[in-house]
Image (cartoon, grey):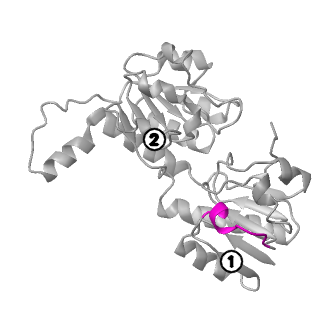
């Protein structure tokens, strides 16, 4: 079977070559959009988050039977022709809980303790810290939007810091009672949180969930941490609010130079362990497809 992998790293190439021997494999370090400029007869395509799968792209893949994204988010997959052609689709769910949640707290600790500034000064032999007074997380209220794999891990870490936990999520999980969390509506989370962490998927319902209307409910000094999807927060807020934003995702990078924004380039998932889980889960999905078994991470995409 002809399989094409895009946005591939050397270690991923070696992994799939080892485990998919016997198939015709094609590897590209570029995106699907950059690499496929004319029709190709690939039957399986594996992409990452920068490949935009549109109807136009799918027209160049007439033999495609199975599409996977090696990521949890899948808003880069446009679904109309995927459904029409009954192409199977999967993502990689649950791989990034520890990596992304820990990274969220690393950003938060930089914001509350100004560690990044102190480290940069020390490299320049400047050991002054009198203007770097921090604040503690202990006793503060952490509001979490979304209690999936990442949000649940955030809650566990926050509990370890001695924080009070609020959660807004589609489903109430057993973790709510186990960690003595307050499972409440969005308004209460916004109103009472000292730190607000976003761990939601991007859907029509969650797009702009932090917006000009409800952001007024936030405490004046609340810190907002978004390691999920940039479009969860309306861009215009970055130019209007003085709140500290800790971001690993943003839809418009023109704001990243603002003093109240700590920005990293979508790297929260990037650990040795998480990358191994991505490869393993991606392989499990491919093997399920090849053996005509249900995909472990099958997606049912809506065209709305």
Q: Badge 2 is on which residue?
A: 253
Instruction: Name the residue carrying label 1.
Output: 26
User: Residue 33 magenta-drawn?
Assistant: yes
Q: 231 or 154: which is nearer to us? A: 231
Residue 76 visible in the shown view: yes
The residue segment tinted magenta is 31-40
User: In the picture shown, does residue 253 fall above or below 87?
Assistant: above
Q: Would you say 167 lies left or right of 238 here?
A: right
**Residue visible at 61% across and 29% down in the picture:** 177
Task: Tell me: 196 left or right of 74.
Answer: left
Which residue is pictured at 74% across the width and 66% down the height?
Answer: 45
Distance of label 1 from label 2 (alpha carbons): 33 Å
Q: Earlier in the sequence, mark 1 or mark 2?
A: 1
The answer to whether residue 139 is magenta is: no
Tell me if residue 27 comes above or below residue 103 in the rendering: below
What's the residue at 45%, 46% (across, down)?
A: 102
* Label 2: few (<14), some (14–19) or many (≥20) C-alpha neighbours in 10 Å: few
Where residue 144 appears, as percent x and y from the top left, is 54, 30
Query: What is the secondary structure assignment of the residue under circle 2?
Result: helix
Residue 81: image location, x then y, percent: 85, 52
Q: Position of residue 163 (x, y in %)?
A: 42, 28
């Amino acid at each position: 079977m002809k399989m094409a992998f895009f946005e591939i790293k050397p270690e991923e190439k070696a992994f799939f070559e080892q485990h998919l021997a016997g198939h015709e494999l094609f590897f590209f370090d570029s995106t699907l959009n950059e690499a496929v400029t004319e029709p190709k007869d690939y039957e399986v395509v594996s992409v990452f988050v920068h490949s935009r799968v549109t109807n136009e792209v799918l027209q160049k893949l007439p033999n495609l039977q199975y599409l996977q994204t090696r990521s949890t988010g899948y808003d880069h997959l446009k679904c109309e022709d995927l459904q029409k052609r009954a192409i199977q689709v999967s993502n990689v769910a649950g791989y990034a809980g520890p990596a992304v949640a820990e990274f969220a707290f690393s950003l938060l600790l930089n914001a509350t303790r100004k560690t990044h500034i102190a480290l940069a000064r020390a490299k320049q032999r400047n050991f002054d810290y009198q203007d770097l007074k921090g604040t503690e997380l202990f006793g503060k209220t952490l509001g979490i939007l979304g209690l999936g794999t990442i949000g649940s891990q955030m809650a566990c870490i926050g509990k370890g810091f001695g924080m009070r936990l609020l959660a807004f999520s589609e489903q109430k999980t057993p973790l709510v009672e186990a960690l003595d969390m307050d499972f409440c509506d969005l308004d209460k989370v916004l109103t009472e949180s000292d730190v607000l962490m976003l761990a939601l998927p991007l859907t029509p319902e969650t797009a702009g969930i932090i917006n000009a209307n409800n952001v007024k409910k936030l405490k004046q000094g609340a810190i907002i941490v978004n390691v999920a999807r940039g479009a969860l927060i309306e861009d215009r807020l970055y130019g209007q609010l003085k709140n500290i934003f800790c971001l690993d995702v943003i839809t418009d990078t023109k704001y990243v130079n603002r003093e109240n924004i700590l920005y990293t380039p979508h790297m929260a998932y990037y650990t040795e362990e998480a990358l191994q889980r991505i490869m393993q889960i991606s392989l499990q999905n491919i093997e399920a497809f090849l053996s005509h078994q249900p995909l472990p991470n099958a997606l049912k995409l809506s065209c709305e």
